[in-house]
Amino acid sequence: MWLALLLAALILLLAWDFESKRHRNVTLKRSGITGPRSLPLIGCGLNLLHVGSENAIDYIRNCFDKYGDTFHIWILNESQVYTKNISHFEDILSSTTLLDKGQLYQFLRAFLSDGLLLSVFQKWHSRRKVFSTAFHFKILEHYVGIMDSQSAILVEKLKPFANGEHIVDTHQYVSLAALDIVTEAAMGVQVNSQCNPDFPYIKALKSVVNIQTDRWLKFSQRYNWLFRLTAPILYKQLLSDIRIMHDFTDKVIHERRGAVERSKADGTYQSICVGDADTGSKPKMALLDILLQSSIQGAPLSDADIHEEVDTFIFAGDDTTSSAVSHALYCIARHPAVQARLYAELVQVLGRNRSAPVTQTQLMQLKYLECVIKETLRLYSPVPGFGRFTTKDLQIGTQTIPANTSIYMVPYLAHRAAKNFPDPLSFKPERFEHDDDRLTFSYIPFSAGPRNCLGQKFAMLEMKTMISKVLRYYELLPKGPELKEIMNFVLRSATGCNVALKLRMD
């Protein structure tokens, strides 16, 4: 009897699986979008058992080679399309209605909730307006001071290794500096991770990011119910770390809101006005201060609203920036002519006083450094892919993507295609000196369209500050293992981003 019931249940499950996938399979077939062989119920799950962060890039590259610029895979009942076609990038990213993120982004929801990165429609639109104030160029000047002071700590931390021989994985140090910058800019508090990497919030944040970004490639941990069953200890660790993060953020918000209320009561409160933002006349501000005085449709943001936006800002600005900066230092070390030209520009614009703080105006004048950063982002896009979720059939070019499908654009590989960039694997910053006529969607390290990265100006200033500070103190030398890229939500190197440092004497 039990066998008959199990058989009946299996037949019903197979029938449901076939019917739920039928429209999507038919639409994909008509559009000529193929992919690895899919089995009932599990889809391409068996194919993916051997795929991890260390070989995900190779797996996706091989699929493109075999199935063309756009291919499809099934993971259980989840439909995924991958593309490196820049015409498709334009159709997808320029859409004002295709705004839902791909299903892989749900791994971030556990600790980012419904912040700007994950929210949609009216909530996303209204929150983006609030964030636009936070990244106004006059407000950014306040953040440059934070970037400069934390970069000064970075060069001090590197000083013991500056003998020209010691191999340094720059990512280890840059990631802590980036975290100090983004947490102070977001919350107005100094967590001092460069001096105290064991601070509970820092450890919890790093743990959560590592756990969640590793799960998307593990079939047994992909869904929460499976994760709880197959990795119960890791699941409990995740919940504990998220609680530590949220408790710290809640404490800072509560204290900051209390300080604002007290200053309003005693008449010392100063509102933040973009029009008269002046670093000489107003105290340092943080994103939290801007959110505390912001309102949407006349209603102030709740603590929960502020919480999810602060967490989103920290997540979005930490690993991405540290990936970009450490890869840039790696590339600079291996291209002496680039480094020589960069240093000459730094001396010309910033002078020879290495300890002098930089300004936003000076950073904006570092044009060749910007080319170096752009070329680094082309070759080593910190975010290897962007995703959207279709709620109805989507026409892109001559192909149709069916409803209920996640479509992932892979700029990491599009940036390395010869048809988009001549001699694509060579590091040539000069290619960005005259890029006005470049196709907008052939180069998208910050995404593009209405949901592009709102913090890209902040990120560029931060990268310029950190790189320029390091190069003013040290000559970078090409020592240590070569890169071995691994793909999670953020691009990393399994072998580190290694250089040697030599103290400049001029």
Image (spheres, helix red, strand yellow):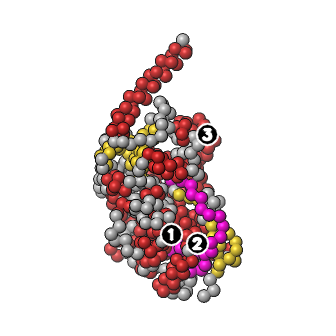
**Mark positioned earlier in the residue sequence (3 or 2):** 3
Q: Position of residue 137 (x, y in %)?
A: 38, 72
Q: Position of residue 352 (x, y in %)?
A: 54, 87
Q: Report if the CB atoms under discs 1 and 2 are less than 8 Å apart.
A: yes
Q: Secondary structure under badge 3?
A: loop
Dot 1 corresponds to which residue?
427
Could one spot residue 57 in this view of the protein?
A: yes
User: For the residue carrying disc 1, how many other residues have a C-alpha within 10 Å: few (<14), some (14-19), or many (20+)?
Assistant: some
**Is 483 on the left-hand or right-hand side of 398?**
right
Q: Secondary structure under badge 1?
A: loop
Q: Identify the residue at image location x=38%, y=54%.
A: 85
Cα distance in 3D space between marks 1 and 2: 10 Å
Q: Identify the residue at image location x=46%, y=66%.
A: 423
**Is 28 on the left-hand or right-hand side of 332?**
left
**Where, quadrant-wise, is the C terminus in this rendering?**
bottom right
Amino acid type at image mark 2: Arg
For the record, the magenta segment spans 465-489
Q: Position of residue 163 (x, y in %)?
A: 69, 77
Q: Quadrant of residue 293?
A: bottom left
Dot 3 corresponds to which residue?
231
Cα distance in 3D space between marks 3 and 2: 42 Å
Dot 2 corresponds to which residue?
334
- The answer to whether 127 is drawn above or below residue 49 in the figure is below
Q: Secondary structure under badge 2?
A: loop
Name the foreground residue: 472 vs 133.
472
Amino acid type at image mark 1: Phe
User: For the residue carrying disc 3, how many other residues have a C-alpha within 10 Å: few (<14), some (14-19), or many (20+)?
Assistant: few
Q: Is residue 310 highlighted in magenta?
A: no
**Is 284 on the left-hand or right-hand side of 493?**
left
Cα distance in 3D space between marks 1 and 3: 42 Å
